[in-house]
Amino acid sequence: MAIGRLAIVLTVSAWAVYVAFTIEQQFIEGKADSARLVIEAIVYLLMVTGLATSAMAYLITRIGFFYRSRGHARASRVVLDAFFDQPAAPVTVLVPSYQEDERVIRTTLLSAALQEYPALQVVLLIDDPQHPTTRRARALLDDARALPGIIEDELGVPASRFRTARDAFERAIGEGAGRAATTEDLQELAGHYRFAVEWLDDLAARHEVIDHTDLFFVDHVLGALATDLATVGTALTSGADEGIVLPAGRLLQLYRRLVATFGARVTSFERKRYRSLSHEPNKAMNLNSYIGLMGGSYQEVQTPVGLALVRSSARAADLVVDEPAFVLTLDADSMLLPEYAARMVHLLAQSAHSGVAVAQTPYSSFPGAATRLERISGASTDLQHIVHQGMTQYDATFWVGANAVLRKKALDDIVEVDYDGDFEIRRYIQDRTVIEDTESTIDLGVHGWQLVNYPERLAYSATPPDFGSLCIQRQRWANGGLLILSKLREQMRARRARGERNRFGELFLRVNYMASIFWSSVCLVTMLVYPFNAELLNPLLLLVSIPYFLMMAGDLRATGYRRTDVLRIYGFNLVLLPVNLSGSFASILQLITGEKSAFKRTPKVRDRTTAGAFFILAPLALITLAGYSVVIDIQREQWGHLVYALLNFTLATYAMVAFVGIGNSMVDLWVHLRDWLYRPVDSRRPVASGLRPRASGALGAEERRTAADAPALDWASVLHYGVPGTEGAASVEEPVGPGTAQHRPPVPAPRHPGPDERAGVSAFRDFIFFTVFQPVVDLATGEPVGYEALCRFADGRPPQERLDAASSSGLGVELDSAMMRASLAAAASLPEGAWVSVNVSPAMWDARRELSAILGESTCPVVLESGALHAGRGLSAADVPTGVQVAVEDALVGYESFSRVEQYRPAFLKLGRESTAGIDDDPARRALLAALVPFAAERDCQVIASGVETAAERDALRSCGVQFGQGFFLGLPAPAGRGARRPAVAAAPVD
């Protein structure tokens, strides 16, 4: 720490002396005697200051790292075990994955599942395309889908054994007054620990070792856990041999540790199956899609654009997502050491950290990389671990997205809700830039949350294995920092509003973290390219930079690298200058245009990834320029500048040869030249007459296949009108890959729509709905005699609200027609002989021609429920199509009920919940109803009581002579083909 402070003093002093000397020389003495020289001197001073600022930030954060390390007190194992005596806060581990190799996902999932945490669920978020176009892509998807089940089955063997043993021990010490633990109990528990060790050793022996990441998994994940458990087992055996007996409570803790270690649930989820979730191609929205479902129950329903998740009651749900207290995010190419979750949650549970939203240990690189590029890239990563640890000392921590434990309550504070049509899209983690974790860090700060780095290396991640994939990763890292800078002002204003102080150290480090890639790259490139006045290059500049490089060399040595690697890192960064500038300029372009930069995932391939031509040619140009500068400096005898130019030329050339490779560079350039000169002819077959390529917004292959195969079509309106964008085609041909096309069977439609109808559907395509049916049952037998069609909107809003919105847009009749067509088409799957009732709006009653056309397409008996009668409209025989019956709605039984039956002579009188609620305790209402039933029967009208929610209400209605009933007690709404969903107990409505 003393040496680090000295380095800071030397850097600041050397910079101040250089600035003072240059100002005196260039401006006071007048050596800058022209406008060009004045501008050069000013620009050069600014660049030196910018580079010195970045160096100072590194030196300051490493001092913070020392402070954090010195003050760190590691919780002992017994403290963690005692902490988990209380019910553990649920943790859900989310592992976003995109076309990852099965071996990579397996090690990640196992490292997460083998966390020593008692309430853990691991969810693999598979983001692969749903319809792969290559054999390899299909294999990757199949492997990813199968892997969670395979891992859970593997863990089930030890987990089942340890749960049984724990339960038996709990019963033994809890029977009667409870017996004390014995040495035999210690021996038995030691045997279970030995079994766990043997199981882990067997798993390690079966794991295929291909590279250094596999070695790390075997040695530091499985091996470390096995060693720890073996130590406990040996201690238990030694204690028993010496006749020592531990308290029963402590033995129970050790049993629970075994159960917690092997008892995780492992599942998977695919957001791209559902049209109601975002399909944005980035990791942030993959995480957001699942986080937005937490704490809810959902049904899978078919909508006009595909499968959707819609909120429902838990008993009717196809998918139930738990609400955790903490969310642990983990990249699919990362691994956690066994105590990661326990230590992070223990930290967040302490009162001193109640305001912390994110706890993490910035990832380190896997040791033992086989290639020089991976090794030097890993060295940079391990230095960043020091930087991030030090930033916590100054409250300037940034969330580093490879791994972190997030407090769910904090995520709820920063959520932003948008809509894609009627589908609600929730953003917890920002995807405006490709460094989503950085922007979310500022959002958390605005809401008063803090972040903390745990001062141990508990997480490790892979580095790109080749220059092409590294370019994609580093370009992404450099893209977005400039855009997020403006949000710092929001955080500062929010803190002032809360009466908190803004610290300069935090602001300085945050600005440097987000913008230094840009200004450092610009400064270095400018110094390399522009021939500045030689007098500006002063030996004092060495004193500005030497402390920085010396401290970095020492840090590299302390983290397992060579001190000379500091020179390799410098040369490597010279080669990466074009990559960093490309990412930074993409940020500036996004700032100007408002268009988000495309998210590029780091490729995970066995072979090399082709690097962009610019990323190869630009470093070669810089090397050439540096070589030219060497020649010019020798000719002009500019020995000071010669040292700088020669250093850059030598190190950049070494980096290009060692880390990129001359052969690889030539191959990549040839590939780009070939692709530019030769463009293969599109070999797709010509589209047959009557077929059109799929347009944007058309149904995908899965939706079309479902539409063709499903017995019940809940979205017949789309089949009737034609899918927006397909021009009414009966079948479509969908491109599935370069030069290929895949033909799908034709989608049947009742008739071919005209242009006006297609325009109508396109206009209300955002009102995504689906149909469910609630049975109307015979109260005497309990058997359904008919069903009411109920349309539900995918965003969960009340149907009347969505109908009003459509009406205000002039689309009320069109949407009403589509809903009625969908209901009647779906009703084809109802039991034979049952009638279906549909609600008719006032506007629909007026559209008699359209109403008659829709009813003419029905294949089952139809009952029209008329809400129009409540508005005082009359109902004549001309209003009702032939063969169709009418049900009149009446909220509360009374004199008006008799009047409506007499006036309209409907087939059914439907009483609302107001009539049935509590009727078993209301003799006056029962008397009215008992009189109404025979009165209606004399006029060929039957009474339907809706809203029946208890057995007592059903019995009271039956005693009054009511024949038909409807309600949650009698049957829940469900899609056609699933049958009536009967609740296990009487329940209040949940729709």
Image (tube, helix red, strand yellow):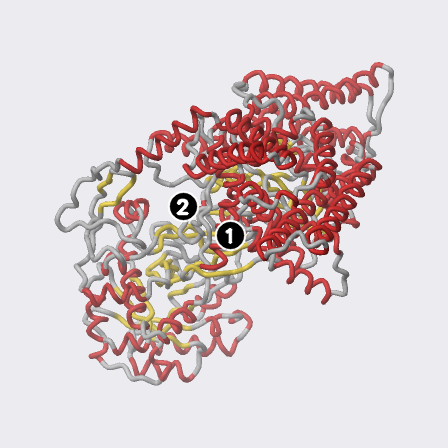
Residue 783: give x, y in percent of width and height.
Answer: 37, 56
Label 1 sits on a secondary structure element that is helix
User: Who is closer to the viewer here, 2 or 263?
Assistant: 2
Q: Residue at x 35, y 35 (%)?
A: 672
Residue 173 shows which numbered tag?
none
Q: Is residue 532 above or below residue 135?
A: below
Q: Which residue is mark 2?
A: 273
Q: Is residue 130 above or below residue 935?
A: above
Q: Residue furthest left?
A: 689
User: Who is closer to the viewer here, 435 or 347?
Assistant: 435
Q: Is residue 841 left or right of residue 626?
A: left
Quadrant where the N terminus is found in the figure: top right
**Contact flag, marks 1 and 2 (Cβ < 8 Å):** no
Q: Is residue 774 left or right of residue 94?
A: left
Alpha-carbon neighbours of circle 2 within 10 Å: few (<14), some, or many (≥20)? Answer: some
Indicate the amino acid at tag 2: Arg
Q: Is residue 670 left or right of residue 249?
A: left
Q: Is residue 990 left or right of residue 51?
A: left
Mark count: 2
Q: Residue furthest right?
A: 243
Q: Is residue 223 above or below residue 526?
A: above
- Front label number (1 vs 2): 1
Q: Which residue is mark 1?
A: 587
Regarding residue 869, the answer to whether it shows in the image is yes
Residue 282: give x, y in percent of width and height.
Answer: 48, 46
Residue 210: give x, y in percent of width and height.
Answer: 52, 19
User: Who is closer to the viewer here, 343 or 20?
Assistant: 20
* Labels 1 and 2: the sequence-earlier one: 2
Indicate the amino acid at tag 1: Ser
